[in-house]
């Protein structure tokens, strides 16, 4: 059985801070909160986000992502996105995990802004090449 992607992924150079969603805040705690800050946002699609993390995140964990836009958005410097962990795979033994997150509400305002920003950045990169 082959897995087909439902959405096209766009590579990004954004960073995000991750907080447990209030529904799961008593189930997921990290001793060093900085371990969940400045995480690279590897890619964005219409369905979710890919992150790199040094911390393992269990499946079905609800998170709140605070994505830094680095001044790319006129609305705000940080987008707040609710997501659910769908997969967490060891990518490198440093440790580095690739975390696949699904948007809780892909039609949300900040989610749509993030998708739009990733699409625009991908177009600019294609034109530059």
Image (spheres, rainbow, N blue to C red):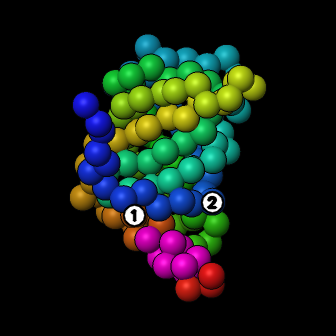
Circle 1 packing at 10 Å, graded few (<14), some (14-19), many (20+), is many
Residue drawn at point x = 48 percent, y = 66 percent:
118
Label number found at residue 13 = 2
Up-down: is 85 above or below 107? above
Counting from the top left corner in percent of width and height, residue 68 is at 59, 57
Up-down: is 37 above or below 93? below
Counting from the top left corner in percent of width and height, residue 29 is at 55, 17
Judged from this view, the residue extending furthest toward the top is: 27
Residues at marks 2 and 1, CA–CA distance in whole angstroms: 13 Å
Q: Is residue 26 left or right of residue 103?
A: right
Q: Secondary structure under badge 1?
A: helix
Up-down: is 119 above or below 65? below
The quadrant of the picture occupied by the C terminus is bottom right
Q: Between residue 85 and residue 70, name the one nearer to us.
A: 85
Counting from the top left corner in percent of width and height, residue 65 is at 48, 44
Q: Is residue 3 left or right of residue 114?
A: left
Q: Between residue 1 and residue 9, name the one nearer to us.
A: 1
Judged from this view, the residue extending furthest toward the bottom is: 127
Mark with earlier residue (2, 1): 2
Circle 2 packing at 10 Å, graded few (<14), some (14-19), many (20+), is few
Q: Name the magenta segment's main secondary structure.
A: helix
Magenta region, residue range = 119-126
Residue drawn at point x = 56 percent, y = 85 percent:
127
Q: Name the residue under label 1.
A: 115
Residue drawn at point x = 44 percent, y = 14 percent:
27
């Amino acid at each position: 059985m082959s897995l087909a992607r439902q959405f096209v992924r766009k590579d990004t150079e954004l960073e995000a801070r991750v907080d447990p969603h209030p529904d799961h805040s008593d189930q997921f705690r990290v001793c060093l909160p900085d371990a969940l800050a400045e995480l690279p946002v590897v890619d964005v699609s219409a369905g979710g986000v890919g992150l790199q993390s040094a911390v393992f995140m269990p499946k079905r964990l609800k998170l709140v992502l605070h994505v830094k836009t680095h001044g790319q958005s006129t609305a705000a410097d940080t987008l707040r996105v609710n997501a659910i962990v769908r997969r967490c795979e060891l990518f490198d033994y440093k440790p580095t995990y690739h975390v696949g997150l699904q948007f809780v509400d892909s039609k949300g305002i900040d989610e749509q802004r993030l998708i739009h920003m990733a699409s625009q950045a991908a177009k600019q990169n294609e034109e530059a090449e």
